[in-house]
Image: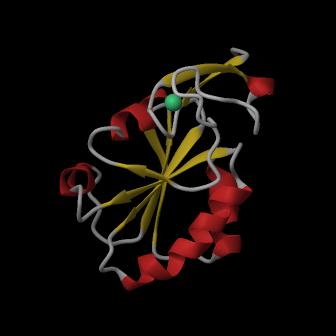
Amino acid sequence: MSDHLRVVCPSCHTVNRVLRERLGPGANCGSCKAQLLSAHPIKLSAANFDRHVESNDLTVVVDFWAPWCGPCRAMAPAYEQAAAELTAQARIAKLDTEAEPAIAARFGIRSIPTLIAFRSGREVARQSGAMDFPGLVRWIRANA
Ligand SMILES: [Zn+2]
């Protein structure tokens, strides 16, 4: 296995190659200097979705949600907390299915919230329905 990980910058979406042991709070994007690890869920859109899902060597977990969805809004603080807890273990991201219906359709999202874990661009796990913080951490750890 390579000692380098590809990590997509959460700010400018440049693909960085980082030594595995360097990936921590001090790792910055070579292009825009932003921190490569984010303690907050990254907002994905049609413009950057494929880049993040396919070019990260970290597992990417995407919360498919919508602003009108009560359970999604109820889960948001726990998801935010999970992103802070699992910063170096997985890429935690969100996709607004109302703003990006084509991506939701591509993955056959029928109910929200739905979480999908992607590894090297491939879906490896999917879970529908809101989870609490311990549930989220457990699920993400199990699939990262
Ligand atoms: Zn950057």
The residue nearer to you, when weighing 135 against 15, is 15
The vertical placement of 7 against 43, above or below, is above
Residue at image point 65% right, 53% down: 39
Residue 34 falls in image quadrant: top right
| Residue occupying the point 59% across, 27% down | 29
Q: Residue furthest right?
A: 21
Whole-percent x and y of residue 63? 45, 60
**What residue do we see at 74% from left, 24% from top?**
20
Image check: 58 left or right of 47? right
Q: Quadrant of the N terminus?
A: top right
In this orientation, which residue lies closer to the viewer: 130 or 76? Answer: 76
- Left or right of residue 90: residue 75: left
Q: How is the image coloured?
A: secondary structure
Quadrant of the image occupied by residue 13: top left
Residue 144 % position (x, y): 64, 46
Along the viewing direction, whichever of 121 and 81 lies nearer the viewer: 81
Q: Position of residue 23 (x, y in %)?
A: 73, 31
Relative to 130, does residue 94 appear above or below in the rendering? above
Residue found at x 58% / y 74%: 77
Question: Looking at the picture, does residue 47 appear above or below residue 112?
Answer: above
Taking the image as shown, residue 103 lies to the left or right of residue 75, namely left
All told, the count of numbered labels is 0
